[in-house]
Image (cartoon, rainbow, N blue to C red):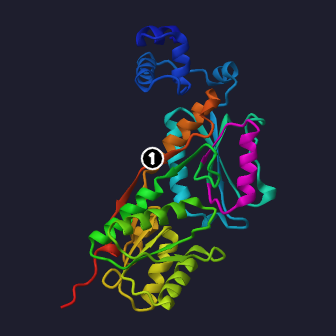
């Protein structure tokens, strides 16, 4: 069978067959589904090597995960492993392979996959605290490479982020509905990780709507995430603010918050409710299990891949920004304060 037979059965042109089977985003999903079904019915298989020669494409997407300089890869925020899995699944669904690289120190930065004919474009994810790495990948994109970014520290880039402000509003609203009123927020207002400021802004907005007092505690960026949470709790207690709940802008920091509260004999959720943000899996196994805001990882991965494929064919998408929806995953850490007799 040939592409002509597939085109006839699907009721499209041969060029549409080629584009559809190559995952070209120009082809609508209903048309692509019809072409794939016709190809399967006729047992038609694309000669991938020939297709790549014709199109000049490799059929591969590179994904770079940026970590902190000198950080062991096992210590990378589990959030990025979930997002990476979603990206790989989305690419596979669009008939693309993925090439993954973990990078941190300046001498390890290498993103010229297109020039080396290893990939057709690049998705950059990972911590925005590594400024040299983000400067490098910003310059790479400005040089004409096909690059899209997750959670970029630069607002003018082609990025996708979680709906951080809305997620924080959901977290704060949940704590209020559970009966908490003296809700503090552990955050970083000046961090290059802009999602933290967006989340604390959402918290402040929602607290103001109910006329509730806000309290922001800055994390110490020089410490590991769990230590940041422990130190922030200590500072909150030293400040003498009579809090009954804490919204933490990062799950890894929130795990440190839970540890510090436990060691100080402060019961969660009876005396203090805790909510984090990121939806990392380990939160479900904390004691007590951590309530969190979880981004739709599947949508995030799909949006990143589709944005990159569009960018390959239409450079006018430069500077486009999108938000991934989030949902509240309610667990025991925010069940409500104990009722005093």
Residue 36 locus on image (x, y percent): 45, 22
Q: Is residue 60 magenta?
A: no
Q: Is residue 136 magenta?
A: yes
Residue 101 locus on image (x, y percent): 68, 51
x 63%, y 73%: residue: 221
Write down the quadrant of residue 277 in the picture.
bottom left
The region drawn magenta spans 126-149
x 58%, y 53%: residue: 151
Q: Badge 1 local density, few (<14 within 10 Å), some, or many (20+)? A: some
Above or below, 152 relative to 263: above
Quick one: SS at disc 1?
helix
Q: Can residue 57 be seen at all in this image of the molecule?
A: yes
Q: Would residue 237 be found to the left or right of residue 96 on screen?
A: left
Q: Would residue 157 be found to the left or right of residue 239 on screen?
A: right
Residue 326 locus on image (x, y percent): 41, 54
Above or below, 109 relative to 282: above
Residue holding disc 1: 298
Q: Quadrant of the C terminus?
A: bottom left
**Frontmost residue, 115 versus 250:** 250
Q: Can residue 2 be seen at all in this image of the molecule?
A: no
Task: Tally the numbered discs.
Answer: 1
Write down the quadrant of residue 148 in the picture.
top right
Residue 162 locus on image (x, y percent): 48, 53
**Frontmost residue, 183 versus 71:** 183
């Amino acid at each position: 069978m040939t592409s002509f037979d597939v085109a006839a059965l699907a009721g499209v042109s041969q060029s549409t067959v080629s584009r559809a089977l190559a995952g070209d985003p120009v082809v609508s999903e209903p048309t692509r589904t019809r072409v794939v079904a016709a190809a399967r019915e006729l047992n038609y298989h694309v000669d991938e090597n020939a297709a790549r020669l014709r199109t000049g494409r490799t059929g591969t997407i590179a994904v770079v995960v940026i970590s902190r300089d000198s950080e062991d890869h096992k210590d990378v925020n589990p959030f990025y492993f979930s997002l990476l899995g979603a990206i790989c699944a989305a690419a596979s669904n669009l008939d693309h392979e993925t090439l993954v690289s973990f990078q941190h120190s300046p001498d390890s930065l290498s993103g010229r996959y297109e020039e080396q004919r290893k990939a057709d474009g690049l998705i950059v994810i990972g911590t925005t605290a590594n400024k040299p790495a983000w400067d490098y990948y910003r310059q790479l994109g400005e040089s004409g490479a096909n690059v899209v970014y997750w959670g970029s520290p630069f607002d003018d880039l082609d990025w996708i982020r979680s709906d951080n402000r809305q997620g924080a509003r959901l977290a704060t609203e949940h704590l209020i509905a559970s009966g908490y009123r003296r809700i503090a927020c552990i955050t970083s207002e000046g961090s290059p990780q802009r999602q933290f400021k967006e989340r604390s802004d959402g918290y402040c907005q929602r607290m103001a709507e109910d006329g509730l007092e806000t309290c922001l505690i800055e994390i110490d960026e020089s410490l590991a995430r769990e230590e940041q949470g422990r130190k922030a709790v200590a500072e909150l207690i030293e400040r003498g603010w009579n809090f009954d709940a804490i919204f933490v802008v990062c799950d890894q920091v929130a795990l440190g918050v839970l540890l510090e509260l436990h060691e100080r004999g402060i019961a969660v959720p009876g005396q203090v409710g805790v909510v984090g943000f990121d939806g990392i899996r380990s939160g479900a196994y904390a004691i007590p299990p951590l309530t969190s805001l979880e981004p739709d990882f599947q949508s995030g991965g799909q949006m990143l891949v589709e944005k990159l494929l569009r960018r390959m064919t239409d450079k006018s998408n430069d500077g486009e920004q999108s938000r991934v929806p989030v949902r509240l995953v309610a667990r025991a850490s925010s069940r409500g304060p104990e009722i005093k007799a």
